[in-house]
Image (cartoon, helix red, strand yellow):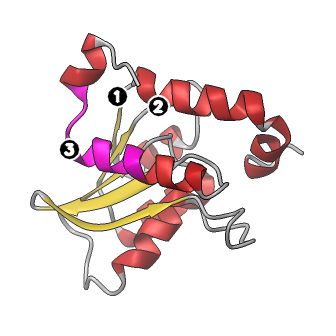
């Protein structure tokens, strides 16, 4: 897939890993949203939306990522990357665990709970990546009902 110049400058290896997770979820027949948890420049865990694959309504990408991290003791100094701005469910987990930085690939498709996270002291960065927006737009065009179900608008 083509990346515009801005995407190449803005994306780092961690967002690239989150996008790879999103693509894995799509390949499994699910919703293409991916997430990684990073501390000190090391990926602690990865996850992707598995609502379809696991028939689990709360298995969003960020929740799967946190679940896969297991017991990490504490979340100080961690950064959560997500290809899409986290929803209130995932934002609640961010706040609950004390994660102080979230980097989202985009929020044009879904605005998520940015204000909620920021009101709880979380530094939220929206990279506004074309690759993330295209991935979601193509999915929504092919699976509008599944997307509406995912965001609770069905």
Name the residue that disc number 1 marks: 127
Image marks 2 and 1: residues in contact by CB distance under 8 Å: yes
| Residue lying at 62% horizontally and 64% vertically, measured from the top left | 50
> Contact, CB < 8 Å: mark 3 with mark 2?
no
Report the span colored magenta: 10-20
**Quadrant location, the C terminus:** top right
SS of the residue at dot 1? loop
Could you say which disc has been placed on residue 13 in the image? 3
Using the numbered discs, state the Cα–Cα distance from disc 3 to disc 2 in whole angstroms.
14 Å
Q: Residue furthest right?
A: 154
Total labels drawn: 3
In percent of width and height, residue 4 lies at: 32, 13
Q: Earlier in the sequence, mark 1 or mark 3?
A: 3
32 over 5 or under it: above or below: below
What crowding class fits label 3: few (fewer than 14 Cα within 10 Å), some (14-19), or many (20 or more)? few
Q: Quadrant of residue 77?
A: bottom left
Which residue in the protein does label 2 denote? 132
Image coords of residue 119 (percent x, y) = 44, 45
């Amino acid at each position: 897939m083509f990346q515009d110049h801005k995407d190449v400058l803005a994306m780092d290896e961690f967002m690239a890993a989150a996008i790879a997770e999103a693509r894995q979820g799509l390949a499994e027949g699910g919703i293409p949203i991916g997430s990684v948890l990073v501390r000190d420049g090391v990926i602690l865990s990865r996850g992707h939306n598995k609502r379809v694959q696991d028939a689990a309504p709360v298995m969003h990408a960020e929740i799967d990522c946190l679940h896969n991290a297991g017991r990490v003791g504490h979340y100080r100094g961690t950064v959560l990357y997500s290809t899409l701005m986290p929803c209130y469910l995932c934002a609640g987990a961010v706040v609950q665990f004390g994660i102080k930085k979230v980097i989202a690939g985009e929020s044009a498709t879904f605005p998520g709970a940015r204000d909620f996270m920021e009101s709880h002291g979380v530094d939220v960065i929206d990279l506004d990546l074309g690759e993330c927006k295209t991935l979601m737009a193509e999915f929504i065009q092919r699976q509008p009902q599944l997307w509406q179900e995912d965001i609770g608008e069905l």
